Amino acid sequence: METREEIKQELQDLADKLERYDEAYHQKDAPLVSDAEYDALRRRAEQLEAEYPDLIPANSLSKRVGFQPASGFKKLEHAVPMLSLQDIFDEQNVVDFMERLHKFLGLDPNAPIDIVAEPKIDGLGYSAVYEKGRFMRGATRGDGTVGEDITENLKTIVELPQTLKSTDLFAQIPNLLDVRGEVYMKKADFLALNEEQKSKNDKIFANPRNAAAGSLRQLNPAITAKRKLSIFAYALGAYEGTPFKTHWDFLQSLKAWGFPINPMIRLCHNTQEMLDFFHELGEKRASLPYDIDGIVYKVNDLALQKRLGFIARSPRWAIAHKFPAEQATTILNKIRIQVGRTGALTPVADLEPINVGGVLVQHATLHNADEIQRKDIREGDTVVVQRAGDVIPQIVRVIKEKRPADSKPFEFPKLCPVCGAHACKEGDDAVTYCMGGLTCPAQAMERLKHFVSKDAFDIQGLGDKNVEQFYALGWIKNPVDIFTLRENYELQLLSLEGWGQKSAVNLLDAIEKAKTVSLSRFIYALGIPEIGEATAKLLANHFITWQTFANVATSPEAISKLTEIDGVGETMAQDVIDFFAEEHNQTLLEKLLNILTIQEAQKQSDNLPLKGKTFVFTGTISMPRDEAKARVQELGGKVSGSVSAKTSFVVAGIDPGSKYTNAQKLGISILNEEDFKKLLDAQLK
């Protein structure tokens, strides 16, 4: 019989072997033993550890999977935001992207710009932070600023190194390293998981991406550990160490440190090479062991990346080229009209269920009446369906030779199917709108759902079903009613079927807490057309307070002042103006403002050196105008198209125009290009 000392040594030997075999298999793609031999060793380790839990070595696999379930995910703020990428869908967009890069950087159109082309993995983004070479914490992308703490779950993924390896080439381990990448599930592992789920009568996942996301976001890391998740690393967040010159060098460093990087990444030297790689990978797509939905192009030179900077939603130096959507043929059973929170009547096709690219599709958008008429789509038609950008199902065309003999053209309703009000188009808009406004139950209910949604007021316990229930009871008809629920209906809520004392109190407390809300969330919650979450943040960060925003939106100069903001176009500006012009909206806002405390936007630019300074450019300068404007804005300043008493500096280049003369008359500081560059450089010191 083995002694405790012998068992302790055997456990350590098993842990060392399994760690070495995992590294060879997952990080080097060079397995040292067969799957059967590996499984036998792991079973032996698990058996001994169950009998001798006090002898488990520190590097045992069980140390990475034996975690207690968490009560919920904590929030982790990203030191560097995890921004999303702009999507493009055709070759001309790639050409346009490269032309924009050259123009912004002031380069000759034929000047070379190296691009790293990476397969776009269809998974869930992650951030893994290392301090002095040890993995410390991990998070999901979240809203790009704050993600969910998935540290313990990431530890269960054997491909993610727990400590960085030092090599001859990369001996210096950085003090801080934030690696970004994608958690995904291989196709074979996805199919095996669904077979297992099916055998247990558990949830079947729609596709590998959903399976990966659902597995990674388990509150119990032990469940995550049982799912076969994989990772690729491809991006850098916060970093303290020897600087890199190119993105390609960074990727090679990742590989040397022990991270898996995609072996198909390619360095392209021109637009044609980028397109060739796109087509090549598109042909190989079906045979790859994992799902990809396009190619990500990134400027290789990190100095150029820094110059290019960011726009509201994404970096200027990277873009995602999506593959054409996969297609399938099925029967259109019925055309159904939905009424959205803005009153838009949207036709939806109810389809005979069909698998399109691994997802069971039962419905597809038909966009509007013009789309139905243009494509001559009818109930009973055999149609070709695709997922646009591999996400939203849509009908590509009708196979008319298979059309039933008694087929009739679809007549778009002239009355709202929900409230019976007139439905019509406004101006040249292709969309048909219900004119019922707030009297239309469909709009009122959807507006309430939007108001309390995650990115708006985020009231815990007030999900879609509860909004529908309270609306049907007549308790909440508009957003104001939400905040008077306690004083008007607390007793009824406590006695309502399905509501216990704890759940009712929790909801009412959550509503009370929501009475203090950030400016960006409040703007987004109002449901102004065209004003999504990113634009709401843009407006909040620009105006800082609600009163400033409201004053501008209702002023005669509203259109010009709103469009001064980089990222706000005339259509967005007009939607904001129209919203404030509606009398019933003003009434609602007045009531809300008496109830709520709207926090000022976080003054991230308080410490920025050019905050409160307004610049106007005139004449020709050697620095590309877009870059000059971006550098001012990054330092907290504003750029205006006209000179006024509020102008701080006029930057005058060669052949300045009337702006130069106006600046002289008003006594405004005038800078030549050299002075301007010195001013910028001084702020960075």
Image (cartoon, helix red, strand yellow):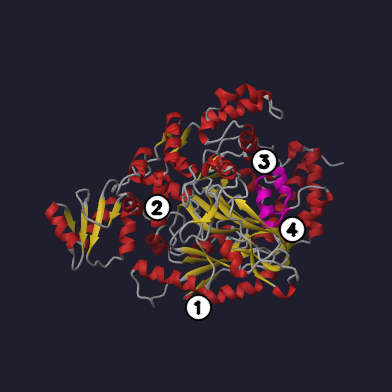
Of the two numbered discs 4 and 3 on the same chain, state the one appearing first in sequence: 4
Q: Front-most of 367 and 152? A: 367
- Pointer 4 with pointer 3, Cβ within 8 A: no
Q: Secondary structure at mark 3?
A: loop
Choose between 423 and 633: the one closer to the eye.
Answer: 423
Badge 2: few (under 14), some or many (20 or more) residues near its Cα, within 10 Å?
some
Percent position of residue 172, x then y: 49, 56
Residue at position x 42%, y 35% from top?
599
Marks 4 and 1 in Cβ contact (< 8 Å): no
In the rendered image, residue 399, in percent from the top left (x then y), is placed at 70, 73
Q: Is residue 535 visible?
A: yes
Q: Which residue is mark 3?
A: 219
Please tell me whether mark 1 sits on a helix, a strand or a loop.
Answer: helix
Q: Amino acid at mark 4?
A: Asp
Check the picture and name the quadrant holding the N terminus. Answer: top right
**Residue under numbered circle 2:** 574
